[in-house]
């Protein structure tokens, strides 16, 4: 479960998005606002598994750190219906009207890679790579719901 940041949201309201630590962010997403060690940053749309509330979140990956944690295997990049190595885990902390949502400990559905960025060349500047901006499976979309158990 991610930390609650109600001290921030109570003062500033609903954020535009959350970073990879569940911290509410209020300026429009840009990769420079994410971790400094990332080689890739995906700006994702996710939904809580329990209440289906949607969030926009970032997920950054450092190739070196990823390979250390995954027996030397490099990260895989998103393609249609497959988010590759990019994910989010538990959704940002949120409440339902009747109390805390159990989904805060259950994980989330990845719905869409809204933006995908990679560092490029010796300058290491961020470059957008639309090839990896893809729709994933949305169990709440009637057009995609065939075969769903929801
Ligand atoms: Zn929820």
Image: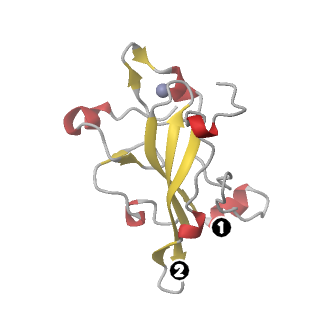
Q: Does any portion of residue 108 appear in the rendered image? A: no
**Residue that carries the numbered disc 1 in the rendered image:** 64
Q: Which is more toward the observer, 12 or 147?
A: 147
The residue sitting at the front extreme is: 143
Closest to the observer, 117 or 2: 117
Relative vertical location of residue 83 with respect to residue 102 in this rendering, above or below: below
Q: Residue at x 42, y 64 (%)?
A: 31
* Residue 118 position (above or below residue 65): below
Viewer-nearest of labels 1 and 2?
A: 2
Task: Tell me if 24 is positioned left or right of 149 in this view.
Answer: left
First in sequence, mark 1 or 2: give its number: 1
Disc 1: CA contacts within 10 A as few (<14), some (14-19) or many (>=20): some
Residue 91 screen position, x and y as percent: 50, 36
Q: Is residue 132 above or below residue 25?
A: below
The residue nearer to you, when weighing 85 against 1, is 85
Image coordinates for residue 6, horizontal then vertical, percent: 31, 31
């Amino acid at each position: 479960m991610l930390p609650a940041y109600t001290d921030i949201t109570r003062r500033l309201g609903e954020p535009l998005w959350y970073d990879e630590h569940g911290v509410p962010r209020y300026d429009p997403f840009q990769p420079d606002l994410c971790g400094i060690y990332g080689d890739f940053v995906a700006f994702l749309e996710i939904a809580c598994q329990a209440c289906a509330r949607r969030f926009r979140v970032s997920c950054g990956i450092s190739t070196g750190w990823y390979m250390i944690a995954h027996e030397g295997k490099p990260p895989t990049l998103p393609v249609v219906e497959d988010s590759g190595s990019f994910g989010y885990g538990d959704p940002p902390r949120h409440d339902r009207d009747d109390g805390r949502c159990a989904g805060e400990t259950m994980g989330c559905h990845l719905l869409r890679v809204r933006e995908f960025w990679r560092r490029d060349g010796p300058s290491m500047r961020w470059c957008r790579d639309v090839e990896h901006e893809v729709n994933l499976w949305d169990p709440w979309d009637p057009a995609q719901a065939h075969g769903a158990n929801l």
